[in-house]
Image (tube, grey):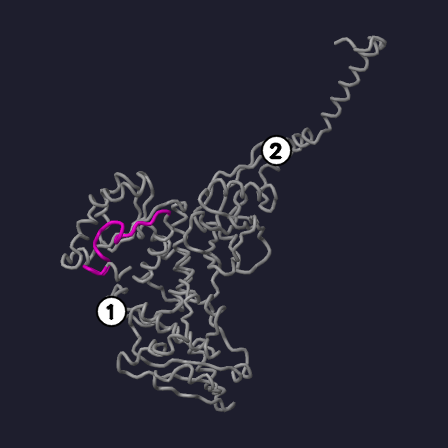
């Protein structure tokens, strides 16, 4: 193009153009993009390309976060842990804390997975594989370790007030630090009674009465961590003693939120120091002596002894009558075992937190036509297909909770849904699982059975995490939960 200014000679214009092109070439040869490409070529030629992936590299961290967020679309991420080396030079382990986007249960979950990473000739990184739930064991950190986590946008809820599933569990028994600490303490213990080997609901109703009284009196509850599991939940069909409270409930949460001591440790300390320090004991053998009557007792230990005559020897009798309006059972202190909740999280994760759940009650109720006349027919495969067609879309993952022993009974539903049952996930509690290893250690090296109560607890919690939750009564049958003419009472 001719110059707009006719006074500039053409020869000068040509020379200027030549200089500009040379300058552009020099600048392009020294640009960051050019130099980076040359560096990558050098790395490839010199063998650097085959060196182990540096999992601490910020570029790797950003890549893993991006891939994780894109892969798991049905969860909300709270924060990520910084990646660490995995099993070899091409893998990195990374942890994150999250909540399901449509979760109805308030809890935080932790997952840690192993990522397989490749590096191309131009040094670009690509994630070519993501491991299963909790596969990234090197990224598992103990609770309250501050290093290694970066927060995503803040959540308005306080995470400390919610269960944290997936963290390392510290449910070691609390101990008294010294003789003086023990002697200055005030304690409450319940002894004997008829609560043993009753249902778990009965056990909790009584235990929380004792804990509520201890809190009312500002005393430490001395508790027996051994539980007798009722025969309804055992494979032997007999009551089984010697079960550990920590198999079923979150003892770490309990001991951090309330003042409790293990009974066996307490009696060892009592024998050592009671006579020496002249520690007084106040004995109560009548449940009608109310906590309000005991508020002024100064003795070191208050012991409630219960006799052999039922039902007056049930612990919960202490919280009846006028006491009922004074003692509040602290239900918020009882959380399910985080080891069991970890199995729940593992099942939900394998379903990508994107499933619907159906509870189908059959068994003895379905066979009892006098009390539940329609239940058997209403929960037949054909009836279920008809009932669910307007409630759950075809092709969905459906988790079925049922007491029907033969799950092949539900095979006709497979034509319309992808159905799942608890036993599909046995590897989460078999001898190669985290649960098996940790409970065995807790049980002094003796393997722990994944018993009926645990199955019910896990089944129920998975059900509650379904996006749609279909119940037998109200949703699938017109029969009342507790039998004919009890619907109003049930609700």
Where residue 32 appears, x then y in whole percent?
70, 31
Q: Is 136 on the left-hand or right-hand side of 195?
A: right
Q: On the image, numbered disc 2 is attached to which residue?
A: 44
State yes or no: residue 475 in magenta.
yes
Where residue 287 appears, x then y in whole percent?
34, 82
Vertical placement of 358 versus 174: above or below? above
Using a 10 Å C-alpha cutoff, classify the residue at mark 2 as few (fewer than 14 neighbours), some (14 to 19) or many (20 or more): some
Q: On the image, numbered disc 1 is attached to which residue?
A: 238
Residue 246 vs residue 437, the one in the foreground: 246
Vertical placement of 7 versus 343: above or below? above
Where residue 114 appears, x then y in whole percent?
49, 46
Distance between the alpha carbons at the discs numbered 1 and 2: 68 Å
Bounds of the magenta segment: 467-486
Where residue 163 appears, x then y in whole percent?
46, 59
Q: Earlier in the sequence, mark 1 or mark 2?
A: 2
Q: Secondary structure at mark 2?
A: helix
Q: Is 8 on the left-hand or right-hand side of 217?
A: right
Q: Quadrant of the N terminus?
A: top right
Vertical placement of 15 versus 46: above or below? above
The residue sitting at 61% across, 44% down in the picture is 57
Q: Are marks 1 and 2 in contact (CB under 8 Å)?
A: no
Residue 154 vs residue 425, the one in the foreground: 154
């Amino acid at each position: 193009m001719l110059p707009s200014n006719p006074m500039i000679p053409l020869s000068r214009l040509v020379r200027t153009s030549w200089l500009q092109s040379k300058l552009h070439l020099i600048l392009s040869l020294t640009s960051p993009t050019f130099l980076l490409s040359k560096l990558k070529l050098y790395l490839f030629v010199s063998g650097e390309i085959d060196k182990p992936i540096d999992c601490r590299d910020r570029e790797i961290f950003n890549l893993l976060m991006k891939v994780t967020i894109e892969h798991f679309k049905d969860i909300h991420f709270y924060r990520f842990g910084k990646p660490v080396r995995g099993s070899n030079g091409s893998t990195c382990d990374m942890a994150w804390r999250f909540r399901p986007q449509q979760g109805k249960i308030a809890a935080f979950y932790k997952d840690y997975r192993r990522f397989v990473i490749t590096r191309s000739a131009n040094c670009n990184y690509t994630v070519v594989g993501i491991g299963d739930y909790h596969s990234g064991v090197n990224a598992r950190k103990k609770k309250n370790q501050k290093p290694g986590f970066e927060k995503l946008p803040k959540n308005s809820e306080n995470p400390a007030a919610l269960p944290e599933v997936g963290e390392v569990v510290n449910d070691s028994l609390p101990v008294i630090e010294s003789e003086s600490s023990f002697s200055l303490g005030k304690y409450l213990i319940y002894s004997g009674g008829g609560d043993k080997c009753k249902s778990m609901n009965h056990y909790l109703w009584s235990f929380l009465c004792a804990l509520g009284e201890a809190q009312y009196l500002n005393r430490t509850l001395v508790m027996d961590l051994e539980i007798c599991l009722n025969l309804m939940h055992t494979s032997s069909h007999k009551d089984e003693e010697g079960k550990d409270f920590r198999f079923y409930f979150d003892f770490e949460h309990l001991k951090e939120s309330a003042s409790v001591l293990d009974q066996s440790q307490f009696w060892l300390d009592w024998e050592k120091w009671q006579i020496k320090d002249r520690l007084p004991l106040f004995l109560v053998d009548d449940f009608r002596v109310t906590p309000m009557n005991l508020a002024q007792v100064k003795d070191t230990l208050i012991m409630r002894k219960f006799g052999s005559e039922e039902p007056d020897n049930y612990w919960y009798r202490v919280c009846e009558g006028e006491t009922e309006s004074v003692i509040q059972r602290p239900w918020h202190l009882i959380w399910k075992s985080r080891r069991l909740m970890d199995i729940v999280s593992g099942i939900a994760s394998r379903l990508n937190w994107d499933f619907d759940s159906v509870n189908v009650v059959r068994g003895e109720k379905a066979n009892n036509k006098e009390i539940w006349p329609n239940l058997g027919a209403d929960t037949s495969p054909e009836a279920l297909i008809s009932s669910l067609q307007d409630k759950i879309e075809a092709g969905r993952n459906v988790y079925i909770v049922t007491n029907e022993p033969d799950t092949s009974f539900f095979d006709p539903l497979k034509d319309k849904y992808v159905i799942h049952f608890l036993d599909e996930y046995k590897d989460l509690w078999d001898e190669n699982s985290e649960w098996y290893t940790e409970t065995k250690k807790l049980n002094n090296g003796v393997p722990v059975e994944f018993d009926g109560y645990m199955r019910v607890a896990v089944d129920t919690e998975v059900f509650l995490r379904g996006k749609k939750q279909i119940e037998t009564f109200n949703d699938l049958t017109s029969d009342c939960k507790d039998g004919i003419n009890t619907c109003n009472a049930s609700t």
